[in-house]
């Protein structure tokens, strides 16, 4: 019984981006309740040389968008111009709309396709579609989604793993 | 072109558990260099009501072990008796040995099998094997692996995302 590229990719992105959007609602409400400037929360980091919350969410979006885009053609560019929790939620919604706009059959046909993608300012890597999804996209996608969660949890926002799993 | 349950599960677990083991080496070396008691580092948390590093690694191991175990039969119990970085590395090695001991064909045959698993002290959930892997195991597995990384990164250990991806 085989499973499909789209079944893994789309299901993962929908569940966790949906969960992340609701987590941002709780973060925004926490800022209001505690009189925290949302702009400060959005620039909060776990270490001075790590990306802040804002960028963690943008990267979570990018790994989902670029995954389905690169598996099936060329991904659109999303400018990193967000300034608020609402902007980030709109970014997530735009990402999900793009993911859903791609035909599952096109994603499913990409398992053995060569996918070339940047892994730094000057470097690219080429992997088969399945390897790209499993070895590169999923760990990166979950890395940034979890780190966004960890920044908020560390900052006192009342969220739990059920929120991360989208079951809350 | 379909992909397989084992291709997704085993590849994910091998890559990230292997990476986590090397990250623990860097954490242990950091403790030695900075005269930090390893027992303190292993009990470090991002928030007082989150699990410490030790438990994050144990849970990463458990989600991998229980995934292949539940997809194919009954997973073994691993007692949470680790006391050191070396113990945690042995736990990861034991987990990988167990994952590799399961026949890929048996994992591949589990996509439509009903899998019942605990989601709390009193609750169980039943999902088809594919849903169990994609909606439950992968987000949980990466959640705990990333949080282990984030605890160490927040504590000043010199690691980067390449370490997390196993490409360092």
Image (cartoon, coloured by chain):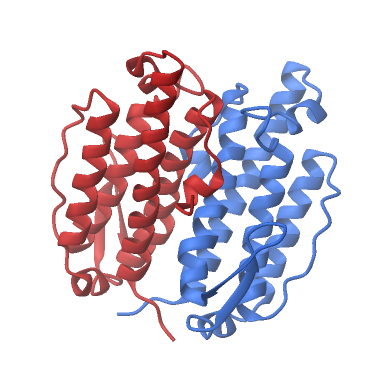
Chain colours: A red, B blue
One can see residue A51 in this view: no
Is residue B144 positioned above or below A79 on the image?
A: below
The one nearer the camera, B168 or B154, is: B154
Residue A147 position within the rendered picture, expressed as x and y whole percent measured from the top left:
47, 36
One can see residue A13 in this view: yes
Write the residue at 76% across / 54% down. Answer: B91
Residue A112 position within the rendered picture, expressed as x and y whole percent measured from the top left:
29, 72
Write the residue at 51% across / 67% down. Answer: B133
Residue A51 position within the rendered picture, expressed as x and y whole percent measured from the top left:
40, 26
The one nearer the camera, A94 or B153, is: A94
Q: Is residue B116 left or right of residue A8?
A: right
For the N terminus of chain B, which image quadrant?
A: bottom left
Is residue B124 positioned above or below A45 on the image?
A: below
Write the residue at 69% across / 75% down. Answer: B101
Q: Is residue A108 left or right of residue B74?
A: left
Write the residue at 75% across / 61% down. Answer: B94
The one nearer the camera, B84 or B116, is: B116
| Res A78 quadrant in image | top left
Residue B72 position within the rendered picture, expressed as x and y whole percent measured from the top left:
64, 80
Q: Is residue B81 left or right of residue A59?
A: right
Q: Residue pushed farthest front?
A: A33
């Amino acid at each position: 019984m085989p499973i499909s590229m789209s079944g893994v990719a789309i299901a993962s992105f929908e569940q966790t981006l949906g969960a992340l959007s609701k987590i941002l609602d709780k973060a925004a409400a926490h800022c209001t309740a505690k009189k925290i400037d949302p702009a400060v929360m959005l620039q909060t980091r776990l270490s001075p040389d790590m990306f802040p919350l804002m960028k963690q969410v943008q990267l979570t979006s990018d790994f989902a968008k670029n995954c389905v885009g690169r598996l099936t053609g060329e991904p659109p560019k999303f400018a990193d111009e967000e300034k608020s929790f609402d902007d980030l939620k709109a970014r997530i919604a735009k990402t999900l709309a793009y993911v859903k706009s791609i035909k599952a059959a096109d994603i499913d046909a990409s398992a053995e396709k060569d996918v070339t993608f940047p892994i730094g300012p000057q470097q690219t890597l080429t992997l088969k579609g399945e390897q790209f999804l499993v070895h590169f996209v999923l760990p990166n996608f979950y890395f940034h989604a979890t780190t966004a969660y960890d920044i908020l949890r560390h900052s006192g926002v009342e969220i739990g793993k059920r929120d991360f799993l989208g079951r809350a």
